Image: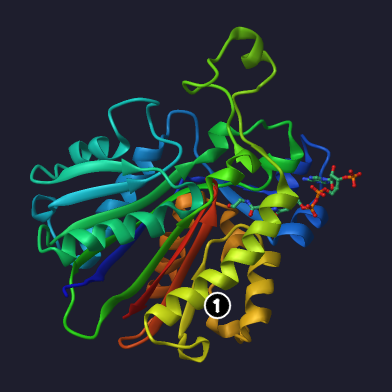
Amino acid sequence: MLTGKITGTGLGLPKKQLTNDDIAKFLDTSDEWISSRTGIKARYIAEEGVSTSDLAVEAAINALASAKLSPEDLDLIIVATSSPDYINFPSTACIVQDKIKAVNAAAFDLSAACTGFVYALTTANQFIATGMYKNILVIGADTLSKNVNWSDRGICVLFGDGAGAVVLQPAEKGEGILSSYLAADGSGGKHLINLVGGSRESLTEEKLKLKQNTITMDGKAVFKFSTKVIVEGILKVLDQAGLKTSDISLLIPHQANTRIIDHAVEKLGLSADKVYVNIQRYGNTSAATIPIALCEAVRDGKVKKGDVIVMMGFGGGLTWGANVIRW
Ligand code: UT7
């Protein structure tokens, strides 16, 4: 059975970084509260006029350069996002396809919130496995700062904007994606939701005034869900690959809260140097956390040939999923 391997990585970030102290200037919060509860110290925020596709394009160009591939070589572009440029169409993937001139690529968006990148990479890998496509660009990109109420301190401090991209190509035997695991529990969808502005509840002037077209979250319910599935998901995907926790060279978990990551590390008995954490600089960039972290880990020489990389995502939907990669 063919499988895909990551041959290039890239990231795209807004220029502006907003620290916890910056937020404390206009909101009743503090660096102490945010960093002790979440691990976040700062996040990048897309300026007015900068959209998800702008960050995705930057990540795409960087990933293509690192894979030494031209845009015309691409067969498919998948953008995992829950903050697309436009509500209906065109898809953000089509906008990226046009901007980078990937004239031979099909393109579509995939919506699985913070698990989006894992879902998209797994989907891309099916196209490699069937032999249908050879060069696929998978992007995780979000600008959720545009979908939060900046006077709701329980939400707005958590998210940041960014994009990460990878190129997926057929692997040699024994390397690449060894196993993938995807899961969902729609009954928990209410815990992390943007209620207004879709086809269920139209945006009215009144609702706009009350800022109801923004993300609401039951933080405790999502925390409970996340701590459970992060451990279960990692064990499951490792088991599918015939591997054990002790085989992990580097765990790249979704960056939502260091307390969730710490819980997993403790339960799995991993040492801290086997886990990549960069939430302190980015906050939760949703579908982008894993590819941004992977890109940094590769850039900083933390990933070597033969390493076992586990990527684990969880979030809205509720959704969760993981991949095991032999680098
Ligand atoms: O990508 C996946 C989706 N997201 C997650 O995985 C997030 C999961 N949940 C969490 O990470 C945590 O639930 C949060 C970090 C969001 C919140 O932490 P918590 O320990 O559950 O705090 P809380 O919501 O229970 O709030 C505790 C207190 C409250 O005050 P009172 O009622 O005890 O007086 C809040 O009003 O902290 C207050 N609070 C804040 N204070 C200062 C909430 N947000 C803030 C803030 N600054 N930013």
Does 306 sit left or right of 313 as displayed? Answer: left
Q: Position of residue 130 (x, y in %)?
A: 13, 63
Three-letter amino acid code of the residue under disc 1: Val
Does 260 sit left or right of 308 as displayed? Answer: right
Q: Position of residue 8 (x, y in %)?
A: 26, 66
Q: Residue at x 72, y 48 (%)?
A: 219
> Residue placed farthest to the bottom in the image?
246
> Would residue 100 be seen by someone viewing this image from the given angle?
no
Q: Is residue 90 above or below residue 221?
A: above
In this rendered view, identify the residue nearer to me: 62 or 311. Answer: 311
In this rendered view, identify the residue nearer to me: 156 or 207. Answer: 207
In this rendered view, identify the residue nearer to me: 174 or 283. Answer: 174
Q: Position of residue 41 (x, y in %)?
A: 68, 57
Q: Is residue 224 above or below residue 231?
A: above
SS at mark 1 in the image: loop
Residue neighbourhood size for the residue with mark 1, other residues' Cα within 10 Å, grouped as few (<14), some (14–19), many (≥20): some
Q: Which residue is mark 1?
A: 275
